Amino acid sequence: MSAAFQTTTDGLRTVISKVIFTLSNESSNMAGRLLFMFCVFVFKKKHVLLAVCGHCLSPRQCSVGEPCRTKLEMRSVSGKPLTQMPNTPCSCQHEETCSDDWSQTDRTLTSTLEAPGLRTALNLMFCQPLKPKHLPTCADNEVAVVLSSYLQIPTNLKSLNCRCGDDSPLQLSRRWMKNYQYFHNYVCGSSLDECSADKSCMTVKAQETVYHCRCPQQTHCATAGRWGASTTSLDGYCVEA
């Protein structure tokens, strides 16, 4: 990769990160969401997203317990479909093949991820039938899933650490930014209590958002103020969806 291309790519990442961070602090604004989805569409069409994220190389071989195929299905809190993002992060070893038949329940794992304004179905396909030792049961407050992306909406599975003991949706507990990437920590739903009326549901800082509790149904977590030049943090509260 030439130095000029690297400089251009780094600059583009910085611009994207600043734009997406601005949109994230306007998460309750529908126009901001629509603008963000349009940006994703444009970058995909122009193949810039592939260059920025660096997914131009052939898939590597999967390690034990690592999914060979992922599919993110995103919906709004009202249930309206937004987008699907399939991905093949690695290839199966030896003569194993990565199936695209999602009805193979012994090789698939599906979890529901909830974040303010967004519900995501995370579908994972594995090379071999799942075994308990590959995915232990999560302890209290243990991070079950980490997703990452150069965009505000996570598209890549970073790590799969454990599985929840029940079928309740995983809850977003922390989102932070590092090296132009967003990382999203999800914990089992039982790890976050339901928010009381006067309790802050999240704290937003320059490069980190921490979620303290989960909002009741028909509500979502949103900040009351706007981010300014002198702002160091904002608190969010549950409001009607």
Image (spheres, rainbow, N blue to C red):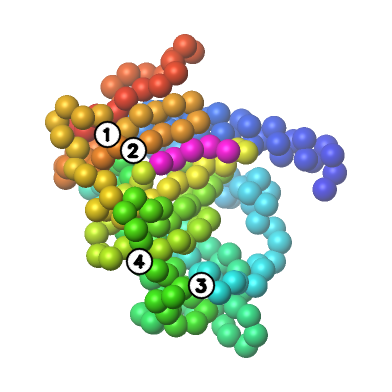
Number of numbered labels in the structure image: 4
Mark nearer the N terminus (1 vs 2): 1
Give percent across and percent down for residue 46.
63, 47
Marker disc for residue 211: 2
**In the current view of this chain or complex, which residue is farthest to the right?**
2
Report if the CB atoms under discs 3 and 4 are less than 8 Å apart.
Answer: no
Q: Residue at x 32, y 32 (%)?
A: 202
SS for dot 3: loop
User: What distance separates the C-alpha of mark 4 from that of mark 2?
Assistant: 22 Å
Question: Label 4 belongs to which residue?
Answer: 137
Mark nearer the N terminus (4 vs 2): 4
Give percent across and percent down for residue 169.
28, 56
Mark nearer the N terminus (1 vs 4): 4
**In the current view of this chain or complex, which residue is farthest to the left?**
197
Residue 131's place in the image compared with 167, above or below, is: below
Mark nearer the N terminus (3 vs 1): 3
Report if the CB atoms under discs 1 and 2 are less than 8 Å apart.
Answer: yes
